[in-house]
Image (cartoon, rainbow, N blue to C red):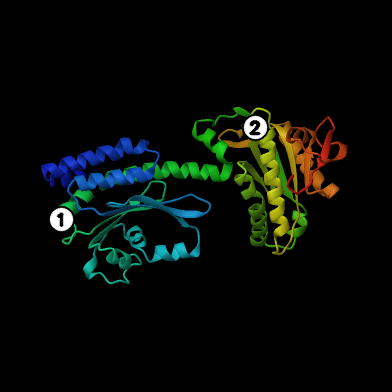
């Protein structure tokens, strides 16, 4: 195995200076840059400044993302950088299988293609590279300690392609490029994984160090609690895959309107959805956004034509939500607690009993300035005081 020091010693003084400048940037300033497109652009410019006739560079990293499998960033001389997400679908898997990325990940070796002599069916990308006038193409793997694997690629339009000195330069700096990619990809993966499973606000707090039992944060918000009616009955004869598909169809109705209205989904509790809309001075604006999200979700449920059909009950309340770490020893759960959360969940439970799709508490009704139809004061399980509950129209207010 050739060491970096040996490769660096084979560079001319000018190229060595360029390599050291690039390595210093990738291990220093690049780690603090928020825009990864900017990092790829600066990296590519420094490679060119080191004497390598680079005209195209890419950085591809895997994602821990609910809807995408990888992020690709492309830089081209004179055009700058752009990014693209590879969606999680069958086509992405087929594209990867017919790409140089699959080969470098399998072999651990660089793929180096002299394009004039490379068959157009060697890889899916070859015809595109040839059409754009590229002559020499390199793809190299990045293996990370987490088990994730990324890539860098380099291409030139120079008639003579990359020289041997150019390739030595790239091999000399590559461990540093890989280290920077791993640092940025790992940080992004950690944030994405936490956001997927605990939500946006808990993710931020966990990353910032809120990981000790008993730490609690309070926020005033409109609270939305929705659940699917008769879920147990509907799934009684379903297998696990069918039940999961039904739940996902339900979430596809309820969650997007919440996010579109600026709400935060805090918990997916079986067939229940708990979300909050942060409040300003009086909470009216947050309540109106929560009401809009509720009506939007219920409209999506009503518009479904797929079987089985299902109904949803949604409750709205205004109060205080507490985020807190609960658990024992090394096993904690970042959860949502508090009387107002319980109240919203209990009101949602009334939807089925009263055959009402949308119920609100008296506090929510007052802050949102709704008319509503009173169902009278209700005794809610686990709460000492009775709560007046109102049924609200699903139609948008005039």
Q: Quadrant of the C terminus?
A: top right
Q: Secondary structure at mark 1?
A: helix
x, y (%) of residue 41?
31, 46
- Label number found at residue 97: none
> Which residue lies at the image location 22% right of the left edge and 39% below the top edge?
21
Please tell me how crowded label 2 is: few (under 14), some (14-19), or many (20+) other residues with Cα within 10 Å: some
> Which residue lies at the image location 71% right of the left edge and 48% below the top edge?
295
Q: Determine whether, in the image, residue 200 is placed left or right of residue 385.
A: left
Name the image quarter holding residue 372.
top right
- Residue 110 visible to an observer of this rendering: no
- Residue 366 visible to an observer of this rendering: yes
> Which residue lies at the image location 38% right of the left edge and 46% below the top edge?
145
For this orientation, the residue located farthest to the left is 12
Q: Determine whether, in the image, residue 252 is placed left or right of residue 298.
A: left
> Which residue lies at the image location 42% right of the left edge and 43% below the top edge?
186
Q: Secondary structure at mark 2?
A: loop
- Label number found at residue 164: 1
Q: Is 24 located above or below residue 168 in the figure?
A: above
Name the image quarter holding residue 134.
bottom left
Q: Is 196 located above or below residue 105 in the figure?
A: above
**Could you tell which of marks 2 and 1 lies nearer the N-terminus?**
1
x, y (%) of residue 81?
34, 49
Q: Which residue is mark 2?
A: 279
Q: Determine whether, in the image, residue 112 is placed left or right of residue 12.
A: right
x, y (%) of residue 319?
71, 31
Marks 2/1: CA–CA distance = 62 Å
């Amino acid at each position: 195995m050739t060491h970096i020091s040996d490769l660096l010693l084979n560079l001319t003084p000018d190229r060595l200076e360029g390599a050291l400048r690039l390595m210093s940037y990738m291990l220093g300033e690049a780690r603090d840059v928020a825009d990864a497109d900017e990092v790829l652009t600066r990296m590519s410019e420094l490679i060119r400044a080191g004497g390598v006739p680079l005209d195209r560079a890419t950085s591809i990293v895997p994602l821990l993302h609910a809807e995408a499998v990888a992020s690709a960033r492309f830089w081209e001389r004179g055009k700058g950088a752009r990014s693209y997400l590879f969606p999680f679908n069958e086509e992405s898997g087929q594209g990867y299988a017919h790409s140089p990325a699959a080969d470098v990940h399998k072999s651990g070796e660089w793929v180096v293609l002299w394009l004039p002599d490379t068959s157009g069916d060697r890889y899916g990308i070859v015809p595109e590279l040839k059409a754009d006038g590229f002559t020499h193409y390199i793809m190299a793997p990045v293996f990370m300690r987490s088990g994730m694997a990324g890539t860098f690629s380099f291409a030139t339009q120079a008639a003579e392609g990359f020289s041997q000195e150019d390739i030595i330069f790239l091999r000399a700096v590559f461990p540093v490029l890989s280290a920077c990619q791993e640092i940025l990809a790992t940080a992004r993966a950690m944030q994405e994984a936490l956001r997927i499973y605990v939500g946006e606000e808990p993710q931020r707090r966990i990353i910032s160090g809120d990981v000790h039992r008993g730490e609690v944060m309070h926020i005033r918000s409109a609270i939305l609690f929705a659940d699917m009616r008769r879920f147990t009955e509907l799934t009684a004869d379903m297998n696990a895959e069918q039940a999961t598909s039904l739940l996902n169809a339900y979430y596809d109705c309820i969650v997007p309107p919440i996010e579109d209205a600026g709400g935060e989904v805090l918990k997916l509790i079986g067939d229940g959805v708990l979300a909050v809309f942060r409040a300003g001075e009086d909470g009216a604006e947050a309540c109106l956004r929560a009401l809009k999200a509720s009506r939007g979700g219920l409209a999506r449920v009503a518009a479904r034509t797929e079987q089985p059909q299902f109904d949803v009950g949604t409750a709205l309340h205004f109060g205080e939500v507490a985020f807190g770490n609960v658990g024992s020893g090394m096993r904690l759960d970042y959860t949502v607690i508090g009387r107002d959360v319980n109240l919203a969940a209990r009101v949602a439970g009334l939807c089925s009993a009263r055959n009402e799709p949308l119920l609100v508490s008296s506090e929510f009704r007052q802050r949102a300035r709704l008319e509503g139809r009173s169902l009278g004061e209700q005794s809610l399980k686990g709460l000492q005081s009775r709560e007046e509950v109102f049924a609200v129209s699903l139609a948008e207010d005039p």
